[in-house]
Image (spheres, rainbow, N blue to C red):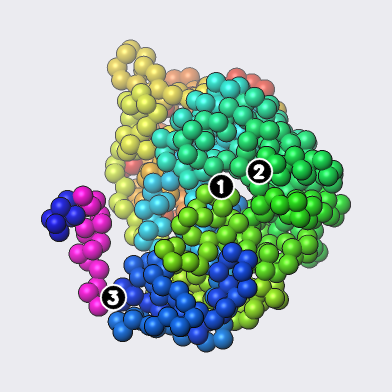
Amino acid sequence: MMKRNLMTMGLGTVLMLAMAPLTMAETTAIVGGLVFDGTGAPAVHETIVIRDGRIAGLGKDLPVPSDAHVIDVHGMAVTPGLYDLHTHWTVAGEPSDFPSIAAAYLSSGVTTVSDFNEAPEAYAPLRAWLATLEAPHVNFAARISTPGGHGADWADQNTTRWINSPDSAKAAIDAVVAYHPDLIKIFSDGWRYNRMPDNTSMNEATLAAAVAEAHANGLKVMTHTLTVERGLIAARAKVDSLAHGLQDRVLTDAEVRFIRDSGMGEIPTLSVFDPDKWVHSSGHKVVANTTLFDNALRNVRKLFRAGVVIGVGTDAGMPATPHGLSTLHELELLVRAGLTPAQALTAATHSSAVLIGQDRDRGVIAVGMRADITVFDGRPWNRIADIHNVAMTMVDGKPLYGLDAPPAAARPGWPAPKKAAKLVDDFERPDGRSSLDTLRTNTMDRGPDRTVEVSGVMLRDGGKGHVLFITAVMAQQKTPYAGVSVPLSAGAVLPVDVSSYHGIAFQVRGAACKASLTANGTVGASWSSSFPLSDRWQKIRIPFSGLTATVNPHRREWTGRDITDIEIGLSCAPGSTAWLQADNLEFY
């Protein structure tokens, strides 16, 4: 029987079992705590027995197994781990890198988050990396928008798919499903907080088709929706939950009933809109508007009292919305909106698990459920400010913060970079992937008025091999740009060490415009150099010493040991048509 079980396991699972310390306690008991189980029931004194990452026993007089590792939380509050259903793990956020973001959530009692920031190509390497970190569970959302829509105003369609018809909606969902996302995020509302021009919005037929295809694949759908009319469209399209609160006006009672009867939930993300956080800030006041915020609070109160499921999300990673702390502040804002502290705590646990479709696995403290548990010093169901007193965060039965957790200094972080291969891309593959088997991406300028870019591979003149081509109609911007990035690792997630080389070489020709090569690094750093461009082929060699820091928030010096991708691009006159061809990109 043992042989049969091992044969049905993955090789990685067998290796993990083989390497697991034999002295590791498989049974843990949390004793002495007052348990708020997440169902809304009053808190009671109970012992929790955990075995193999799940709750195996729960009760007031439950005996503690003799082999259990005991964690005494005498007098403290024990709750299910908190959720944050709307985050962006972006280098522009606070903190700005994956290990630090993970630690920020654990220190705030958050055990499950949804990340709306990643390209599908990054899911697999990020999941593998997260498995080596001390981190909450992370649900990755595939991004869908409209051409020119919110969320489509940066990156390319390898990050956010653009749709504007039922047929394109089905095709987009089918394309991202191949990457195994945990949910779908649709930017259906182009309304930009009433402080900047609206982007395009999605028509109802397209939205409904995308939702239907997602549901056919077993995926929940959340939508970027901030206006009442768009919220009603989302309800008719059978969206599972809104990823923001409705703000442009207060809902009528009839509209509230319609949303309730549709079964759609809401994740208000009040934290990102809270005008009070801008009191000491002179910038990024785009989303600070007291009237809109008051509308959002009133609509949350009306929807909740009507029976609409309210979950917790923050839009963390956006300006002045730090990871972890914003989740705790969101509960305070839900109380300000009219929920009791106990109701806000339930929204952050069981209700959020319902909205993401994980309520049979976590979100409450009950036998058989995943042992994702948070311990507070206080009574957060009575006094919401006590949520800031996190004493322990447990994920899958393992304390990762606070009591019994390993010291922060011992936590794993960035992995050692792998040495870069000499050849980056010879552009011989017709499937959009590089010689490194990484997916090339277009890197045109940002904003609602973007350069229209097409890239791919074509036969080199003379028919000997293939070359990269870029053709573009430049946007009406001060410095319009079109480029192609070649990741050095899957999804440009993990750093690669290029320090054993001296520079980058490639062949290129194109329109007589300003051209540049850029080496991008971790946490948003990049180094660039311009090079001459004409319609005749030439070989360019750019030494690393010739690269100049361009975007480098931490003012890091070039080491060559933290590079994620190499980018070639050009910037031509606004409105002009430009082109570039490149071949044999390699280190020397």
Corner quadrant of residue 44: bottom right
Which of the pair 346/535 is nearer the observer?
A: 346
Q: Going 67% across and 69% down the picture, which residue do you hit? A: 342
The residue wearing badge 2 is 264
Q: Quadrant of the N terminus?
A: bottom left
Q: Earlier in the sequence, mark 3 or mark 1?
A: 3
Q: Percent from the top left, x then y, of residue 455? A: 48, 25
Which of the pair 145/212 is nearer the observer?
A: 212
C-alpha gap between disc 3 and disc 2: 43 Å
The residue wearing badge 1 is 116
Tell me which secondary structure the magenta stretch mostly adopts: helix
In the rendered image, residue 28 lying in the magenta stretch gets the answer no
Q: Percent from the top left, x then y, of residue 347? A: 64, 60
The residue wearing badge 3 is 24
- Residue 521 position (above or below residue 434): below
- Residue 72 position (above or below residue 480): below
What segment is highlighted magenta in the picture?
8-23
Give the SS element for disc 3.
Answer: loop
Give the SS element for disc 1.
Answer: loop
Q: Residue furthest front?
A: 61
Q: Percent from the top left, x then y, of residue 9? A: 23, 52
